Image (cartoon, rainbow, N blue to C red):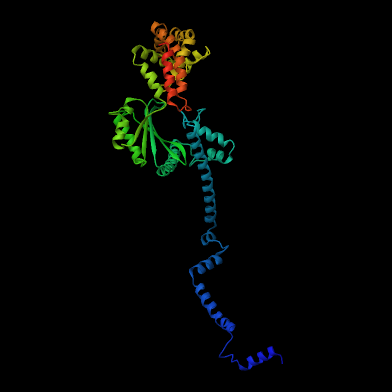
Amino acid sequence: MSKKLQNITTLNSTTDYKTTPIPSLKIFHHTPFRVTRKSEKHAISQKHLTNQEKFHLLGKVRIEHAILEGRRLAAVKHNGQVGINRRLIARMIHVVCFLGKQELAFRGHRENNESLNKGNYLELLKLLAQEEQLLKEHLLSSAIFKGTSKMIQNDLIECVTSVLNSKMFNEIQRVNYVSIQADETTDVSCRSQMSIIFRYVVEQKIVERFIGFFDVLKNKTASGLADIILSEINKWKIGNKIMCQTYDGASVMSGEKSGVQFRIRQIYPNTLFIHCYVHQLNLVLLHGAKTLKSVKLFICSLTMFHTFFSRSTKISELLREQGFKLPNQSDTRWNYHSRAASTIKKHFLDLKNAVLHVTEEPGWDPISVCTASGLYDKLNDANFVYFLILFSKVFLYTDHAFNFLQSKSLSNIKSYISEIQNLKKICPI
């Protein structure tokens, strides 16, 4: 008998399997008990019971739908209509955002069916409906909600504004410094408004956010304007971030003792005042020249010509027949007056014939006739003609200085000083 077989025989004859079990058999002896205990614990767990319930209900019809088929169909129809409504509302919001981005008016004078021009909002929806069948059917057949009324347009504008303001508010709260810009403007109804803009840095890029227009017709004093700006500062919670304020050169805004900038600095001392870049040259040249009464009357006369010939298309047609028109008015840029003087001098006789036509020909209203008579007398006035010729030559030099000083590419202050010194030497005045 081999040695290996002898060892096995010896082991079988001396080992008591009942008292000394093989280790591997011990593991298999306790495994069924553990599996049973864990399976019983899992069977009563909440997760198992929930999944078991879902398994039994898989593919089954809801009880209320099985009882009443009409309710199920109504639910399907309702969900489908909700999806259609969302698509229609999204299209209307796109129109609102487009008109706002392009700075276009929403409504015209009339929006009834007889009007050929129903306003930009309705006309744009009508244009989109030509290619979108869903929008076309909605505009033609909808009787409950069409989305074209004035109230709905205002509601959509307010909703878009609310979303944009919320985004801007979160954006402003993450920046460290904010500068504020304010300026007075006039709408189409000649109502005075103040526009406010916030300027700050986002991801290493300078951004400007328009906050809104604010009615200042009742109180255009420094106190009233400052109250509006302070109210917006508190509303947007940027009091501890304001570092700069920028306004135009009017005394009510830039006054050192009672102006808006002074009142803002009383509350926020670290808010520096920087003069508006656009108005700087206008203040130096235009307002400096207006200190002379005769020059002031001449500059006002230039503006009066544009005001008269732009008041109606019938009057404007008189100049278009002669092949020219007066430049658009702009009180904040000096070169408007230079272009107006140059145009009047070049077309002096044509302009004179145009105002004479209004005074002599029938069919003109009394206001136009009276204004045209005053302009005709102005063209015959020796002082006006003298200043027209004089400033036409002066403007040749000042326009060059205007373009040079308004350039953003120059950073050397000595170049600006040198240009001004040359203007003083060569200017004919």
Residue sitting at x 59%, y 37%: 131
Query: Which sits in the foreground, 16 or 238?
Result: 16
How many numbered marks are there? 0
Question: The C terminus appears in which quarter of the rendering?
Answer: top left
Query: Which sits in the foreground, 306 or 285?
Result: 285
Residue 421 visible in image: yes
Residue sitting at x 41%, y 18%: 421
Query: Which sits in the foreground, 332 or 176?
Result: 176
Residue 286 left/right relative to 9: left
Query: Which sits in the foreground, 107 or 260?
Result: 260
In the rendered image, the residue lying farthest to the bottom is 13
Q: Which percent across, then down, holds residue 264?
A: 31, 34
Q: Which percent across, then down, holds residue 173?
A: 40, 44
Quadrant location of residue 19?
bottom right
Residue 244 left/right relative to 144: left
Q: Which percent across, then down, holds residue 175?
A: 41, 42
Residue 364 visible in image: no
Quadrant location of residue 227?
top left
Q: Which percent across, then down, holds residue 25?
A: 59, 84
